[in-house]
Amino acid sequence: MNYENLQIEKSNFVAKVFIHRPKKLNALNRETIQEIHEAFKSLKVDDDIKVIILSGKGEKAFVAGADISEFADYTVEEGKDLAAKGQELVFDYLANFPKPIVAAVNGFALGGGLELAMSAHFRIASDNAKLGLPETSLGVIPGYGGTQRLPQLIGKGRAMEMIMTAGMISAQQALSYGLVNHVVAQEDLLPLAEKLANKIMNNSMVAIKAAIKAVNDNYVDGVNGFKTEINAFGEAFGTDDFKEGTEAFLNKRKANF
Ligand code: COA
């Protein structure tokens, strides 16, 4: 499928999904939200893809936010619809995606852009990256999960400060907050993402899918993540990957999942 605002490259079981709206610093309009959903929906069932790297095209921006020009004259109802549809189609969809998603933050990750990065399973950044939730400077609040995921990732006090000040933090600051896991020079960002993807792919993708769900269940109201873990741990014993992984270890060879 051809996308207007995405570029997708696939090789060696890794898909790289780039947001690509160069004239708008990759800002997320409705069309891009829909395209991200369609792209990930097809990657979900693509047997040739094990890990997804999510990044922004160009050297300046990962994603500079939701497209402000699109929602500037929205009504209350339209505002609610924008947030609800976005969360359903992209932000929750990616957070609960059964294959690992690594966000490679290559520049501005603001508003919906930071929220998109936070929906990935973890983040790495280039040293020029700037991250923030500037929504309160526009008279709104983060609407794509930012008020929930930022405190989960960096703690309530730091999240409150970022949301209230609407300021940007540097990649180094994001590293010290634990918002990103690694910071490298821009030219090293995608190679690092690929290296991490390859390391992930040495392991059982069946087990990783179960682990993503167990970790996420810690944050779902009314769900006991420990119970999810116990069940998923037990279920693992019935998988071919478990047999292969343990047999390989006992026979001192590399597992072939
Ligand atoms: N929505 C819509 N358009 C956006 C955008 C957004 N979130 N972010 C950037 N753009 C557009 C600009 O309007 C500009 O378009 P134009 O050339 O047609 O005027 C183009 O992208 C380039 O951006 P510009 O502001 O000229 O670049 P800059 O280097 O001077 O500043 C930023 C970069 C990221 C600091 C600035 O673009 C910005 O503050 N963007 C908005 C960030 C934001 O508030 N996001 C949260 C939205 S909820």
Image: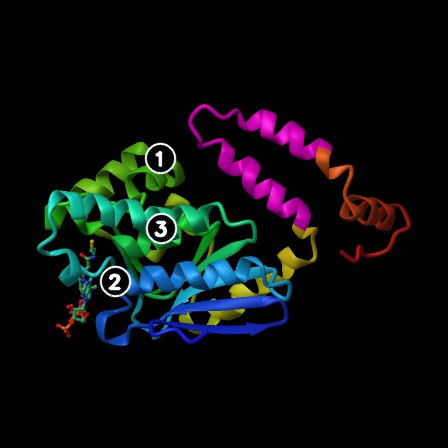
- Within 8 Å of ligand 1, the CB of disc 2? yes
Looking at the image, tell me whether mark 2 or mark 3 is earlier in sequence order.
2
> Is 196 placed left or right of 78 in the picture?
right
Where in the figure is residue 42, as x and y percent of width and height? 51, 62
Q: Which residues are magenta?
A: 206-234
Three-letter code, disc 2: Asn
The residue located at (50%, 37%) in the rendering is 216
Q: Is residue 231 magenta?
A: yes
Q: Which residue is mark 3?
A: 174
Give residue 107's quadrant in the image: bottom left
Predominant secondary structure in magenta? helix
Three-letter code for the amino acid on which mark 1 is drawn: Gly
What's the residue type where badge 3 is placed? Ala
Magenta highlight on residue 211: yes
Mark 1 neighbour class, 10 Å CA radius: few under 14, some 14 to 19, many 20 or more: few
Residue, disc 2: 29
In front here: 233 or 200? 233
The relative height of residue 246 versus residue 131 in the rendered view (above or below) is above
Please rate how many residues cluster around mark 3, counting C-alpha atoms within 10 Å: few if below 14, some from 14 to 19, many from 20: many
Q: In the picture, which quadrant includes the C terminus?
A: bottom right
Question: Real-space Cα distance between discs 2 and 1?
Answer: 29 Å
Position of 210 with respect to 158 (left or right) is right
Near mark 2 (Cα within 10 A), the count class, few <14, some 14-19 or many ≥20, is some
